[in-house]
Image: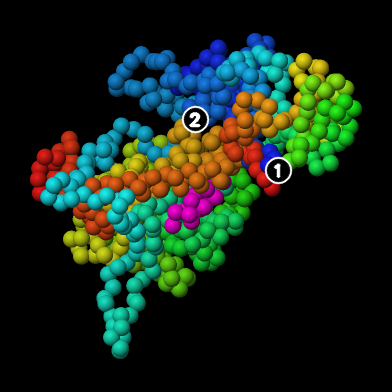
Amino acid sequence: MDIFIPSEYEVVRNPDLCIGCRVCERQCSNEVHKFDKDLNKMIADSRKCVNCHRCVCLCPTGAIKIVKNPDTYRLNSNWPQQTMNEVYRQANSGGVLLSSMGNPNDYPVYFNKILVNASQVTNPPIDPLREPMETVVYLGKKDVELKRDINGKLVDNLPPQLKLSVPIMFSAMSYGSISYNAHEALARAAEELGIYYNTGEGGLHRDFYKYSKNTIVQVASGRFGVHADYLAAAAAIEIKMGQGAKPGIGGHLPGMKISDEVSKTRMIPKGIDAISPAPHHDIYSIEDLRQLIYTLKEATAYSKPVIVKVAAVHNVAAIASGIARSGADIIAIDGFRGGTGAAPTRIRDNVGIPIELALAQVDERLRQEGIRDSVSVVVAGSIHSSADVVKAIALGADACYIGTAALLALGCHLCRSCHTGKCNWGIATQRADLVKRLNPDIGYKRLVNMITAWGHEIQEMMGGMGINSIEALRGNRLMLRGVGLNETELKILGIHHAGESM
Amino acid sequence: MKRIYVNEDRCIGCHLCEWECAFANSGLDKMFKLKGRFGSEFVPRIQVEGGEKSDINFAVNCRHCTGAVCVQSCIAGALSKTDEGMVVIDREKCVGCFTCVLVCPFGAIMPAADGKAAQKCMLCTDNSVGEPNCVKYCPNDAIVYEER
């Protein structure tokens, strides 16, 4: 601990309500709470608190609250407290700052500056409770020529597709960065919902091959856990070129999270940091990417779609065009707010672009080039709600990946301490006593509930617009209007300002 | 008969069940009124086994055994089995010899706070809660109340 840095949060205990049950003490992996025998009461060391709210949620009498420590340095707009603390931390450690979860800084959230249309009078809205409403989406190449056989029957030459009951999937989160129980919850929820979860770059635990129908397996630069059975098991294969939280660098799994099982699944040594290379060392061009795509297709008998995931960066539209031409079936784009289990703070907070702008540009570019149908587009990077899903689809996406929202459903309170491996909610940890805290029976139901609720809301919003099929919403930017956006932003998003008519 | 079962893979050793048990049987209206009275005035009928830093924890309460030795050993006829199979204790008949405490293979019977009679889990049928409070408030669904 650095004596220069005061505690960021303060644990406040109501002495009238505290019954000394010590649940907070037993539940805090950061050892904040302690029963003091001399004083015969609970005490707290706020400096260790990461504000994960586990103690607050489990306190049976509601005696605890965590508040922002009002202690402050001399106020300075140019040198905020956080910035000063980061300097102190680096002066103390000499290391690169590490952070977890998505970029928390105050950048614009474009989804929040976009409003959705609704039908009035001349074009009636549709009531999804009384009328059919289609939210099924197929992901994959669709630009095939219609062919007939000698008898005039249509030849089924459609490349493999992924069928989603709702346009939402769980994004790549590796076993290692998150726990066995978290993976089980995601896998079971995906199966029940008829959607997909993604193994991330951590391989597929042998127990989860039974969910393979709903599994997307990832091939990342580290090639962790990639083998023939792994590829054969999957519904689709994703090549991870980049991640929104850390464009330009590879994954980083701290050694303390590499347990026996993680080491076996990833096929790497136990206890040593697993750092994926920044590039794929066999990919330095679109042609190289094409080779890997077709290697994977060849290895799986052209039976499953191949996804290429990239971070949203400045020239993402041109990159997407290249990917579409390289033979990929699906492009996944991860915005700069995307989550992570561990990323260098400077990269997470300063690299990449917002997903809304990237998506609009990619969709526009692929349309201009006449290759939009040759590829599906999946977007990720802070999809907060069903409204964001609707807006993303209207901007041109086929489906969305959600990571952080899924973890929130499992109990995550965004304390952003995943890299410490001491997650009190049993999600981003490999410590057996902590992993236990996430009961997959509860977790998977909560995920199913959340996606079901989002599905209802998507139907409601589509119905309001008078649209009864998600296909009719895709790329329907006339359904969107911007508020408080400047000319350039509106032009990039390809939408009108609120108040402007068609 | 429905019984309380504990899944040690799910039990996180938070000990909340002990407090919920003591509260349910205390007759108090607010939990914070247990302050300073837990273990002395109000003794829980469920106990979490496993050390503070142990990976394995397990909440134990009356198993309502088929051939319950506590019932067989009771010299006062205070312990008996209901038709459904639940082991019940009649406080009025109990003479406080605590033979049952000695013979229970699970340590699930203990002297009540006043030391004059034994007490055991009655599946919350003898308090105003009506359903096992430990099950209701287990944060990880480790304790379940079901027919097996």
- The residue located at (62%, 30%) in the rendering is B130
Q: Amino acid at mark 1?
A: Met
State whether the magenta stretch is mostly helix, strand or loop.
helix
* Chain letter behind tag 2: A
Identify the magenta region: A181-194
Drawn side of residue B82 relative to residue A163, left or right: right
Q: Amino acid at mark 2?
A: Cys
Q: Position of residue B25 (x, y in %)?
A: 67, 23
- The residue located at (29%, 35%) in the rendering is A107
Above or below A458: residue B93: above
Gap in Å between the C-alphas at discs 1 and 2? 40 Å
User: Mark 1: few, some, or many residues within 10 Å (few <14, many ≥20)?
Assistant: few
In front here: A281 or A124?
A: A124
1 vs 2, front mark: 1
Q: Position of residue B66 (x, y in %)?
A: 80, 42
Q: Position of residue B104 (x, y in %)?
A: 83, 33
Residue where numbered disc 2 is placed: A52
Q: Position of residue A184 (x, y in %)?
A: 54, 50
- The residue located at (62%, 50%) in the rendering is A261
Q: Quadrant of residue A82?
A: top left
User: Mark 2: few, some, or many residues within 10 Å (few <14, many ≥20)?
Assistant: many
Q: Is residue A375 visible?
A: yes
Above or below A102: residue A401: below
Asked whether A183 falls inside the magenta stretch, the response is yes
Asked whether A116 falls inside the magenta stretch, the response is no
State the mark number for residue B1. Answer: 1
Above or below A410: residue A171: below
Element type where label 2 sits in the image: loop
- The residue located at (27%, 57%) in the rendering is A469
* Chain letter behind tag 1: B
